[in-house]
Amino acid sequence: MEFPDTHPLPPPLERLPLDLFHLFSLSLASRFCYQAATPQGSLACATTCRNGPQSSGAMISFAMCAELLSSLTSTARATVTATVTAALRSVGFRPRTPPPTPQHKQEQHETWLPFAQFLSKLPGLTDLVYSYKDQVPACVLAALHRHHPRSHLHIGAFSLRSLYQARDQLHDIDPDELAVATSPCLYSIFAKYETYDEQGRFGFNLEALEQMVSGWAPNLKRAQIHHSMPSNWRSIGAAMLAAPRPPWKGFSRQSLDQPTTDSLQHHQTRPNRGCLETLTLSGAGFNLYNIEAWKSRTDFGALRRFELNCSLSLQAFQALASMAAQTNFHSLREFGLAVYAISPPNTTASLDEPASQILQAVPQLEALKLSGCFGRRTFEAALRRHGQTLQKLSLIHCADDDDNDVDGDGGGYMLRNGCVRAIQQRCPRLEDVRLHVRRRGGGPDELPRLRRAVLWLDCRVPPGDVAYRAETIRKAMANCAVDEALARAIFQEMAATASAPLQRLKLETDLPVRIVDGLPGFRDVATWIGRSWVCTRDETRGEVMVRETTDERDSVSRNSLRGNLELVDQECKDAWGEIWPPRAEESEWRDDWRSFPLRSGE
């Protein structure tokens, strides 16, 4: 998951995206480059360590940069940076990994010490973004507290590992993890938690997060919290729920008496409620009790961004509508709501009315995200109440059932042309839009005339549109094919009709679920040809730059997928051959495909 808006970005001309080694090299290149570290100009550098600090190259880089900063005069060092962000990108995040042993902690200390020393030399650190798979090392946290007590710590893989405990082995939280949880530098977190794990241990991270939000983490302002389930939850869930869940003892006095950090000085006078500015809840298991619990932990009136990316009951929707009507969200500027029915008798149609009441009652928004099977009333309430103020809009409707593809009062309000035109007419300030639009083999219906967009191309074939299975497969396959030429054509068509210069377009594809689930091998074919693209405008050269959004892990998966195509069902191979006949005997059929040309009809 992305971790957006974690730190302010400096002006473009003052920001150099350099790694640590190149920062040192830059200072030696010329007098001008050296002067970037003087009071005449601030230098903002994003330091990135992709695989953690274990590599010798990373340690050398940290040491060299620390030496560079030490060599500067005290006057210059005071203004070397306005913003320096050290970003350690996650290589995987399992919230229930065992807490480190004393030996592992010592090894971790020795590994991270060069980085901690580097942090101590930085004169202007304002934000540290930490998204590594292990817990924040004690030496790094100590460097922040001692040298940058007002800096913001952003943790993109937050979990208190010591709070996964067996029923007969309950214990206090690890002191080092307590220091992280109550750090005065802690500003934002992305936390994943499980109520119990695959080994049958109880997880108390939710209780800890609630205490942190209520004041134990005094400067925590942004929290994204995801509830996940263990892979074997069906087999162990009943056994876990059969016996009463032991209560969590909380941040105990024994833990608090250990002088691990100055952050605990506030615990005697901590407030009863926190003041989060951002709260995002996602995953499974949220209900009315959870909503009310979070309301008691943090002041909803201080929230500027609130997202509920989870299934909620009808009672929870009604409670939210009541809270909104009582002006509990008077500071809200960005709101996200998922409309999914968790179980009968609750249906998406029954949620449409309370969802529309919520949107009608909250203050006028700058950003709105709706997902799920929202209906007509919800859509119309969004435009009626917020259309004049919206700058960002995301509408991702449910795409798992063709029967929901109707302009009805119930769930599944499909974004047809009329909806897109309504957005254009009633949202004059809209700058960023994300829509789920119907793919029609290159037809004009998929081109909303908007400025900057993320489009999910819905590749389903409507019921009744085709008579035979073979033709259904062919049409679905043709819809899924998105190559560079089509991406460029869509960008150019939107740019030609936009009232403002189109800056960026991202294209994603949604697979036709019924065919994917019913035809072996079709998922591999659809994934192979259903590429994702980002199109941007190069103002200096007047060109459209198109790139496929593929990282290193996607490349490995794509190579594996290429081999899987040899094993697909014969029906898929027949459809492929009819759509894209071989152009040469020696051609590689897996690469011999293309999108249907765009037909705008303008």
Image (cartoon, helix red, strand yellow):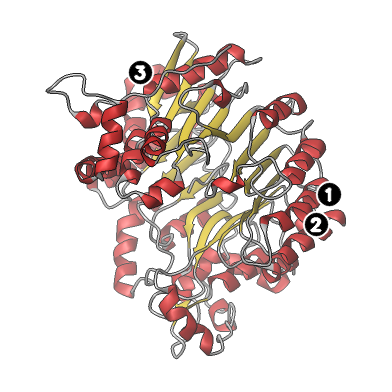
Which x, y percent locates residue 400?
52, 49
The answer to whether residue 289 is seen in the rendering is: yes
- Marker disc for residue 361: 1
**Residue beneath label 3, please?**
30
Position of 120 compared to 372: left or right? left
Query: Disc 3 to disc 2, how far (Cα)?
Result: 61 Å
Position of 598 compared to 245: left or right? left
Position of 562 compared to 305: left or right? left
- Marker disc for residue 293: none
| Crowd band around label 3 with a 10 angstrom C-alpha radius: few (<14), some (14–19), many (20+) | few
* Earlier residue among tags 1 and 3: 3
Please, what is the three-letter code of the amino acid marked with disc 3?
Ser
Q: Secondary structure at mark 3?
A: loop
Which x, y percent locates residue 439?
50, 31
Which x, y percent locates residue 178?
52, 70
| Quarter-of-image position of residue 429 | top right
